[in-house]
């Protein structure tokens, strides 16, 4: 495993970490809303590298140790929800298409012509846009617990939305209390981590970088993206869609709809999986993603 490094992509810098042989085909992991690259478990990255890939995980802009926009406020959560429901666009600091371009520029900086792209949640949305807008850079696509953005799909449960709208934590203790409650709501009911495991994971992220302003701006980018259905129909990369049947944040219909609109996509649904990457399922995910990616 290489140490973390900062790489300039366009006008910003991204924090990046690699696993595996640099000569192997590249696999880029894109994480979700407010989540740092450490949310891709190290064991998961190592296991994929052992399957013959150069695995690259990174912090998206505005999160972790990557570039923070700063000084630019996002619309409030309620305003974003209303805009999404009523079908009008808000002015936002940046779009998901900008985040997709960040990934392309990262590939450029690493001298990678094309890569296997794996995205989770918001990262799945970014990965979809990457595959649609830069087809020559994407060997295969894996979209995990994400959605097509189709406005007709079921939306997150009310108590989940209320958690997203919660005020920022004032200190580590209040953050931990709120975050533990949130993850117990959205996590996998069939694969709950112990309190100790969840606490360790959350504290790692908090102590590495806690930056709620960036989360708000990323949420604004999601809210303003709209439907990706037409874009999905143009994707030519072999696509694997993974989703949990018990996901309360991005209901399983989102994964089903994603696979429905991408030509030839393979859909894998998991009982008891919520909106996380359950440790007991990681070996299955590694097997699915590596076999899928070895198609190209």
Image: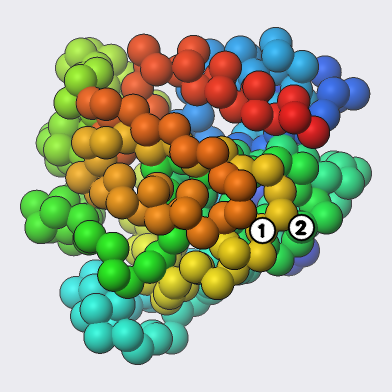
- Please say whether residue 182 is visible from this viewpoint: yes
In contact (CB < 8 Å): disc 2 and disc 1: yes
Residue sitting nearer the eye, 62 or 186 = 186
Residue 266 is left or right of residue 253, and the answer is right
Q: In this view, does 255 lie above or below 198?
A: below
Q: Picture coordinates of residue 77 (x, y %)?
A: 24, 70
Image mark for residue 235:
1
Residue to which mark 2 is pinned = 135
Q: Is mark 1 on a helix, strand or loop?
A: loop
**Image quadrant containing the C terminus:** top right
Residue 26 is left or right of residue 84, and the answer is right
Residue sitting nearer the eye, 193 or 264 = 264
Specify which label sits upstream in the sequence, 2 or 1.
2
Q: Residues within 10 Å of mark 1 (few under 14, many from 20)?
A: many
Residue at image position (61%, 13%) is 47
Residue 98 is drawn in which quadrant?
A: bottom right
Q: Residues within 10 Å of mark 2 (few under 14, many from 20)?
A: some
What is the spatial separation of the Cα atoms under label 2 and label 1, in whole angstroms? Answer: 7 Å
């Amino acid at each position: 495993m290489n140490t973390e490094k900062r790489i300039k992509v366009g006008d910003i810098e991204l924090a990046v970490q690699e696993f595996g042989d640099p000569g192997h085909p590249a696999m880029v992991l894109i994480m979700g809303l407010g989540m740092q690259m450490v949310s891709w478990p190290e064991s998961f990255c190592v296991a994929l590298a052992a399957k013959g890939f150069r695995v690259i995980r990174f912090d998206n802009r505005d999160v972790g140790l990557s570039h923070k926009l700063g000084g630019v406020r996002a619309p409030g959560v309620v305003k974003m929800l209303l805009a999404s429901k009523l079908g009008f666009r808000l002015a936002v600091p940046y779009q998901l298409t900008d985040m997709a371009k960040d990934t392309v520029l990262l590939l450029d900086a690493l001298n990678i012509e094309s890569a296997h792209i794996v995205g989770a949640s918001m990262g799945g949305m970014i990965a979809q846009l990457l595959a649609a807008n830069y087809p020559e850079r994407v060997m295969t696509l894996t979209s995990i617990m994400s959605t097509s953005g189709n406005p007709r799909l079921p939306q997150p449960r009310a108590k989940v939305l209320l958690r997203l709208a919660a005020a920022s934590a004032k200190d580590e203790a209040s953050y931990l209390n709120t975050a533990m409650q949130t993850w117990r709501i959205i996590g996998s009911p069939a694969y709950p981590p112990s309190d100790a495991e969840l606490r360790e994971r959350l504290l790692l992220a908090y102590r590495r970088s806690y930056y709620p302003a960036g989360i708000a701006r990323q949420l604004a980018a999601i809210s303003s993206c709209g439907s990706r259905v037409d874009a999905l129909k143009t994707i030519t990369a072999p696509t694997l869609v993974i989703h949990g049947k018990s996901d309360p944040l991005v209901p399983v219909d989102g994964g089903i709809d994603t696979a429905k609109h991408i030509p030839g996509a393979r859909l894998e649904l998991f009982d008891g999986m919520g909106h996380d990457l359950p440790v007991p399922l990681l070996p299955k995910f590694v097997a699915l993603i590596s076999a899928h990616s070895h198609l190209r």
